[in-house]
Image: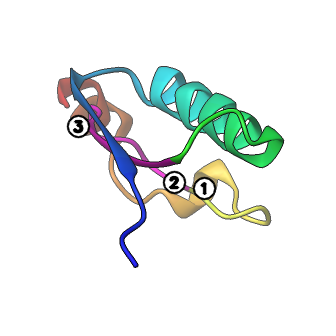
């Protein structure tokens, strides 16, 4: 049995915007308002820290990070 999947493609978008889009799609899917979705996008590089992480866990110099 084949299940329809919606393909959504974006160019590069900010991380927060992509995350907000994903959350809206999840909520709509849970309500049954849309089919399964394959979301393809790219966002600029980000640093992801765990819940217990601290800024001191980033070993790169602030000057280097500003260049990214």
Q: From this viewpoint, which residue is outermost toward the front?
A: 1
The magenta segment is: 36-48
**Residue at mark 2 to residue at mark 3: CA–CA distance:** 17 Å
**Horizontal and vertical percent position of residue 29:** 68, 43
Q: From this viewpoint, which residue is outermost toward the bottom?
A: 1
Q: Nearer the viewer, mark 1 or mark 2?
A: 2
Label at residue 31: none
**Horizontal and vertical percent position of residue 42:** 24, 37
- Name the residue rendered at 56%, 37% in the picture: 22
Per the image, the residue denoted by label 3 is: 64
How would you rate the neighbour count of disc 1 (Cα within 10 Å): few for under 14, some for 14-19, many for 20 or more?
A: few
**Residue at mark 1 to residue at mark 3: CA–CA distance:** 15 Å
Quarter of the image where one finds residue 66: top left
Residue 37 lies within the magenta run: yes
> Looking at the image, is mark 1 or mark 2 earlier in the sequence?
2
- Name the residue rendered at 66%, 36% in the picture: 23
- Name the residue rendered at 39%, 42% in the picture: 46
Per the image, the residue denoted by label 1 is: 56
**Horizontal and vertical percent position of residue 67:** 18, 26
How would you rate the neighbour count of disc 3 (Cα within 10 Å): few for under 14, some for 14-19, many for 20 or more?
A: few
| Quadrant housing the C terminus | top left
Q: Is residue 37 above or below residue 59?
A: above
Q: Nearer the viewer, residue 67 or 49?
A: 49
> Looking at the image, is mark 1 or mark 3 earlier in the sequence?
1
Quarter of the image where one finds residue 50: bottom right
Label at residue 48: 2
Assign a secondary structure to mark 3.
Answer: helix
Assign a secondary structure to mark 2.
Answer: loop
């Amino acid at each position: 049995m084949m299940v329809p999947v919606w393909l959504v493609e974006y160019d590069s978008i900010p991380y927060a915007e992509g995350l907000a889009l994903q959350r809206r799609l999840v909520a709509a899917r849970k309500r049954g308002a849309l089919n399964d979705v394959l979301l393809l996008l790219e966002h600029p590089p980000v640093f992801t820290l765990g819940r217990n992480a601290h800024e001191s866990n980033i070993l790169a110099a602030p000057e280097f990070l500003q260049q990214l």
